[in-house]
Image (cartoon, helix red, strand yellow):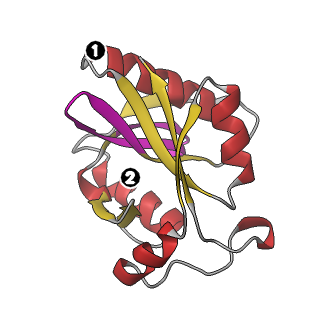
Amino acid sequence: MECERVCSQNRQRVNAFIQEHWHSETMILRGREIDMTKTEGFCFCEDGQIVGLVTYIIYDDVLEITSLDSLHERRGIGSRLLELVRQEAKVRKAKKIVLITTNDNINAIRFYQKRGFDMAGFFRNALDVSRRLKPEIPLIGENSIPLRHEIEFEMLV
């Protein structure tokens, strides 16, 4: 498995992966539209296919993860992508790494806490606002849980 930084040579593959797994190239985080075709990131590939991807934006002294996907859970792909993000945050002199997940994403809530992230914010009914910008966001999420709230995690660098 090889690691690649998201760049012009693999951007088309990355965008196709985002479209396939997120059903759009636009992500809504805390009521902000993020153009995922312009995010930075890292991916792991096997046989020319992306099997893991992390994307992020950097502003002020914050690195914000906008997506993290691993097609093969429990093989360390997500953990390795997070480590690359930590290293990047240090190089870019970010003071913290933040990310948002939704209340239904129990696996992500567990995953991030086990890797040193702390819950830093809870945005009640945030998905109501997000659906105004992106109506295709479903009402029911993973595990048949109503998709309503955003939870912010952070890690100091």
Q: Which of these two is toward me, 15 or 64?
A: 64
Q: Which residue is mark 1?
A: 91
8 and 23: which is toward the camera: 23
Q: Is residue 32 left or right of residue 23?
A: left
In the image, residue 49 lies in the stretch drawn in magenta: yes
Measure the alpha-carbon separation of dots 2 and 1. 23 Å
Secondary-structure class at tag 1 = helix
- Mark 2 / mark 1, whichever is N-terminal: 2
Q: Which residues are magenta?
A: 41-65
Residue at screen point 65% across, 59% down: 103
Rendered location of residue 119, percent (x, y)? 58, 38
Q: Which residue is mark 2?
A: 14
Magenta span includes 153: no
The kind of residue on which mark 1 rests is Val
Name the mark nearer the viewer: 2 or 1. Answer: 1
Q: Which amino acid is tagged 2?
A: Val
Residue plotted at (46% across, 29% down): 3
Tell whether 153 sits left or right of 140: left
| Coordinates of residue 66 in the picture (x, y in percent) | 41, 48
Please provide percent x and percent y for residue 83: 51, 21
Q: Looking at the rendering, in which quadrant would you find the C terminus?
A: top left
Label placed on residue 81 = none
Main secondary structure of the magenta stretch? strand
- Give the image location of residue 88, x and y in percent: 34, 21
Give the quarter of the figure containing the N terminus.
Answer: top right
Mark 1 Cα shell of 10 Å, populated few (<14), some (14-19), many (≥20): few
Vertical placement of residue 153 versus 93, above or below? below
The answer to whether the residue labelled 2 contacts the one labelled 1, judged by CB atoms less than 8 Å apart, is: no
Residue 146 seen in the figure: yes
In the visual, does 94 lie left or right of 139?
A: left
Please identify the quarter of the rendering in which residue 79 is found.
top right
